[in-house]
Image (cartoon, rainbow, N blue to C red):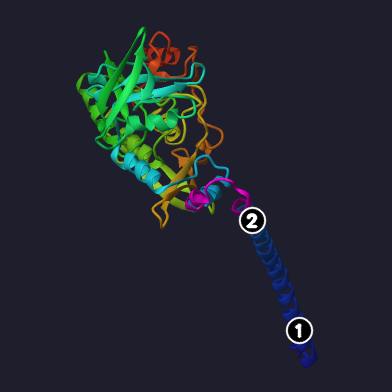
Amino acid sequence: MNKKVSIGVCISLVIIAVAATFAITMVFSKQIYNGIISNISQRSQSFDSADEINSLIANYYYGDLNEYNNNLGSSLAEGYVNGLNDANSYYMTASEYESYNNKIENGLTGVGVESFFDFSSNKLIITYVYDGSPAQKEGLKSGDVINRIDGETVRRSNYEKLSEKLFSSKLVSVSVEYTREDYTKTAQMISGFAIPSIISKTGGTNGYIRIGRFYKNTSEELDAALASMQENGVESVLFDVRNTSEGTIKYAAQAIDVLSPNNSGYIASAVDKSGKVKETFPTHGTKYNFNYAVLINSSTSGPAELFACDLRDILQAELFGTSTAGVGTMQELFTLDDGSAILLTTALVIPKNGETAVYDKEGVKPTREVTLLADSNEILMLSESEDNQLREAMNYLNSNAVETY
C-alpha cells in the first residue's frame, strides 16, 4: 500500500540534510583553516626572525656589509635546504653546480691521484695514483704526503678546498710539494686527466673491480672491464664498493643493468611521498656469466647500496663486510634562476625485491659479516695481507661455492 508523505515532513528532511551538509563542511573548513593559519603563523614568525636578524646586522655588525648583501641570497637558499636536516639534500652555488653536473655527466678529471686527510697526523696522504696520469709521470706514489698545493700549506682547515685543485676539469698547471720518507720534492702537473670511475685487476680466474663512483661513464667502463676479463678466462668477479657514495641512483642502475639477466624484470623503482612511482629502472639482459661477490662497509652509501642490494637479489652475490650507511633515497637536481641549484631528496628507492629489501635508514646487511682488522679504513692503501675482508671474499670465490645463474 502506498503511503503519502506530507509536505511538512519533506521540508523537515531537506532542512536536516542541509544542516548536516553544512556541519560537515564547517568541520573540514575549520581543519583547513587551522592548518593555513598555523602555517601562516609559522611563516610569519620565521620572516619576523629573519627581519630582526637583518636589522641587528645592519645596525651593529662591524664588518663589510657589501659582502653580506652579496652573499645573502645564497645563504638564505642554503639555510632553507639545511632546515630539512637531510644530509643528502643541499644547495649549490652556480659554480658548484657547474662542477657537480660536469663530473656526474662527463666524469672526473684532475692530475690523477686519490687522497685522504689523516686527522691523527694532520697530513694529506695520496692513496692511489692512476696509470698514465700526470701524477704518475711525475713519479708520485701511494703513501706520499702532500705538504703544499700551489704554494699553500695543507692544513686541517683548508685541505678540502686545496684538494679540489687536484680535480680540476680545466687544463691548468698544479704545483704539488710532497714528502716521501726522508726527502721532499715539488711536482708541476697539468690537470685535465680523465680519472676512471673503476679500478680493475685480474689474477688467474679471479677479477677485482673497485667502483669508486657511479657516474654516467661508469657502466661503459664496467662493460669494458668485464669484457676484458671474459676474454682472459676470468670466472669470478669481486666488486669493491667500500667507502663508495658518489653518483646517482640512475647511473648505479645502469651499472647493474650491465650485469643483470633478461629475466630479472627490473632493477629498482623510485616512489615519491604519495606512494606514486616516479621512475622505474628496467633491465635489458647481459652477455656475462660470472660468479660474483661484493665488499661493503658502513661508508657504502646511496647508489653503492643499491648496487650491492641488487647484486645480492638478482645475481645471488655474497656480500662481505659490515652493514652499509642506510641511504635508500633518490635525489633530483633543480636549477634556480641565478644558475645555482638544489639537490633534493624526492623519492624512496625500492630495489629488486620490493618492500622487503628497502634499506633506507637500516642499511644493507652483509650475508657474511667480516670486520676489517686493519687500523686504516682507507681501502686503496691496504695491502692484500692487511685486507682480511678482501681475502675472505676471494677465498670464497676460489672455492666455487656460488653457482652461475
Closer to the chain start, of discs 1 and 2, is 1
Which of these two is toward me, 229 or 73?
73
**Residue 101 x/y as whole percent:** 35, 44
Specify whether 34 is left or right of 264: right
Q: Is residue 235 visible?
A: no
**Residue 248: which quarter of the image?**
top left
Specify whether 16 is left or right of 350: right
Q: Which mark is residue 60?
A: none
Q: Is residue 136 magenta?
A: no
**Residue 85 x/y as whole percent:** 58, 43
Q: Which residues are magenta?
A: 57-72
> How many numbered marks are there?
2
Secondary structure beneath label 2: helix
Q: Residue at x 55, y 48 (%)?
A: 79
Q: Is residue 94 visible?
A: yes
Q: Residue at x 27, y 37 (%)?
A: 170
Residue under label 2, please give it: 46
Above or below, 229 against 18 in this view is: above
Which of these two is toward me, 273 or 122?
122
**Residue 399 x/y as whole percent:** 37, 12
Residue under label 1, please give it: 15
**Residue 4 x/y as whole percent:** 76, 90
**Residue 46: which quarter of the image?**
bottom right
Which of these two is toward me, 107 or 28?
107
